[in-house]
Image (cartoon, rainbow, N blue to C red):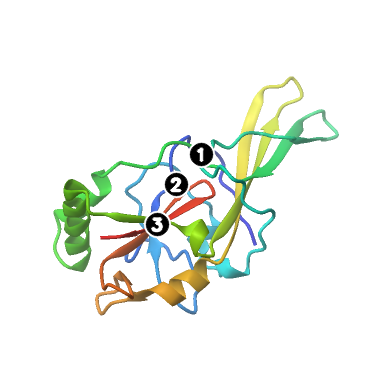
């Protein structure tokens, strides 16, 4: 169960939070949804609401999780008309972590639970109190497969990217809950919670 992105931005994948747009976890727990204020594109797997916990990881994580993804030992395949593709699988980020706050700033102008959450996040960023945890230490692992497409003359035809992630739904089930307003919370502290994805790097946030 994987889906693709037509082109991958060289910036971080959007944040995963409690009440925005599309479910990104197991439908049975329904614990979190994509937050769309950050730059970049997200794998369609995260848009479908399909169970991430059922995806099979392709490889284990490498030691340096913050290195940029590179086409290492790419496999080249030709089509009958001479076009070709190069595919490589690995673990790495796709750029700097997202720091675009415009979506949160816009949400904070409204009213209700989502606006309250946005205001709390902006306040925590300003005070430097957002807590971040590497989810590779929490049972979540992921690999990314990039397929670059080329015309026969070598011209760029596009790129397809898929992610294979395990442990996400189990982590969310064990460590998060949805409050009465439909907002994702950390079970242990009651604080707002979210997940940031940058390539195969996942970070758990509380604030």
Q: Residue at x 72, y 26 (%)?
A: 151
Please state if 7 lies on the left or on the right of 185 as rendered: right
Q: Is there CB contact under 8 Å for labels 3 and 2?
A: no
Q: Which residue is mark 1?
A: 94
Task: Residue 91 in the image: state x and y as whole percent.
Answer: 60, 46
In three-dimensional space, the C-alpha distance between marks 3 and 2, rounded to whole angstroms, equals 17 Å
Secondary structure at badge 2 equals: loop
Please count the marks in the image.
3
Check if mark 2's residue and mark 1's residue have beta carbons within 8 Å. Answer: yes
**3 or 2: mark nearer the eye:** 3
Q: Residue at x 61, y 37 (%)?
A: 159
User: Circle 3 sits on which residue?
Assistant: 133
* Residue 44 seen by the camera: yes
Whichever of callouts 2 and 1 sits on the residue coming sooner in the sequence is 2
Where in the figure is residue 37, as x and y percent of width and height? 32, 48
In-front residue for pair 66/117:
66
Q: Residues within 10 Å of mark 1 (few under 14, many from 20)?
A: many
Q: Is residue 30 visible?
A: no
User: Residue at 27% across / 72% down in the picture?
Assistant: 189
User: Which one is earlier in the sequence, the residue at label 3 or at label 1?
Assistant: 1
Q: Which residue is mark 2?
A: 13
């Amino acid at each position: 169960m994987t889906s693709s992105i037509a082109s991958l931005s060289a910036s971080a994948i959007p944040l995963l939070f409690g009440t925005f747009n599309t479910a990104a976890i197991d439908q049975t727990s329904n614990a979190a949804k994509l937050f769309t204020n950050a730059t970049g594109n997200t794998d369609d797997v995260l848009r479908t609401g399909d169970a991430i916990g059922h995806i099979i990881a392709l490889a284990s994580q490498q030691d340096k999780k913050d290195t940029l993804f590179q086409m290492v030992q790419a496999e080249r395949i030709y089509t009958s008309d001479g076009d070709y593709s190069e595919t490589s699988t690995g673990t790495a980020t796709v750029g700097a972590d997202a720091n675009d706050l415009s979506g949160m700033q816009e949400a904070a102008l409204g009213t209700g639970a989502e606006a309250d959450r946005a205001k709390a996040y902006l306040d925590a960023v300003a005070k430097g109190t957002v807590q971040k945890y590497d989810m590779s230490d929490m049972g979540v692992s992921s690999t990314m497969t990039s397929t670059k497409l080329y015309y026969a003359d070598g011209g760029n035809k596009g790129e397809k990217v898929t992610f294979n992630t395990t442990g996400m739904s189990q982590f969310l089930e064990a460590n998060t809950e949805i409050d009465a307003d439909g907002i994702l919370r950390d079970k242990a502290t009651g604080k707002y919670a979210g997940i940031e994805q940058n390539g195969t790097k996942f970070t758990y946030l509380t604030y």
